[in-house]
Image (cartoon, grey):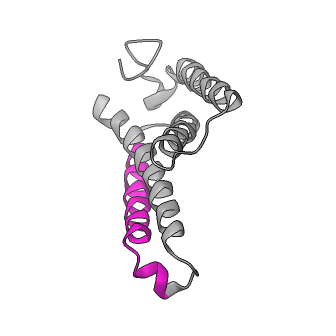
Amino acid sequence: MKLDFILIFLSILLQSLSGLFGKKGALEIERFTVINAISNLNYLLSLVCLGLQAITWQIALKKYPLSFAYSFMSGVYVLILIFSFFVFHESISLNNILGTVIIMIGIIFLSMGNSNKAQGGQGYKNKWLPII
C-alpha cells in the first residue's frame, strides 16, 4: 500500500519537474517554434516528465479513488513555489507562504476524510495520513 501511495507523490514530483524544465526551456529560447522546442533539452525533459507523470498517475488511479488521489495533486503548487525560489530566485511573499500552508493543511484534512473510502473502503491503519 505504501508503494501505491508513492506513485501519487512521484506523479506530483514529475509534474512539478515538467514545469521547472518548461520554464528553463522558455527562458533559453528567444522565439518559440516547434523546431526550437524539440531541439531544446529542457523542453524535451519537460515532455518526458509529463509522459512519465501520465503513466504513474494512471497506475495510482487504479489503486485510489479519483477524489482521494486528486486532492494530493495540489502538492504541485508547493513544489513549484520551492523550485521557483531556489532555481529561479523568484521572490516569495507572505501570501505565497500562507497559501502553501493552507494547501498543505487541506491535503491533510482531505486525506483524513477520505482515508476510509480509499482502496474500496478498506481504510488505513493510521487515520492521519495514509502513508504512515
Query: Which quadrant does the N terminus fall into?
Result: top left
Can residue 37 be seen in the rendering of this structure? yes
24 part of magenta stretch: no
Q: Predominant secondary structure in magenta?
A: helix
- Is residue 67 shown above or below 46? above
- Is residue 41 shown above or below 16? below
Residue 74, percent from left and from top: 58, 38
Q: Residue furthest left?
A: 3
Nearer-the-camera pick, 17 or 120: 17
Q: Residue furthest right?
A: 95
Residue 2 lies in what quarter of the image?
Answer: top left
Residue 3, percent from left and from top: 28, 34
Residue 75, percent from left and from top: 53, 36
Residue 123, percent from left and from top: 44, 20
Task: Residue at 53% x, 68% y: name it.
Answer: 26
Task: Residue at 48% x, 83% y: name it.
Answer: 36
Query: Which quadrant does the C terminus fall into?
Result: top left
What is the tally of numbered marks visible in this picture?
A: 0
- Looking at the rendering, the stretch of residues picked out in magenta corresponds to 35-62
Nearer-the-camera pick, 34 or 110: 34
Task: Residue at 48% x, 44% y: name it.
Answer: 83
Task: Residue at 50% x, 63% y: name it.
Answer: 22
Q: Residue furthest bottom?
A: 35
37 part of magenta stretch: yes
Task: Report whether 93 appears left or right of 79.
Answer: right
Can residue 1 be seen in the rendering of this structure? no
- Is residue 37 shown above or below 73? below
Task: Report whether 73 appears left or right of 98.
Answer: left
- Is residue 14 shown above or below 2? below
Residue 5 lies in what quarter of the image?
Answer: top left
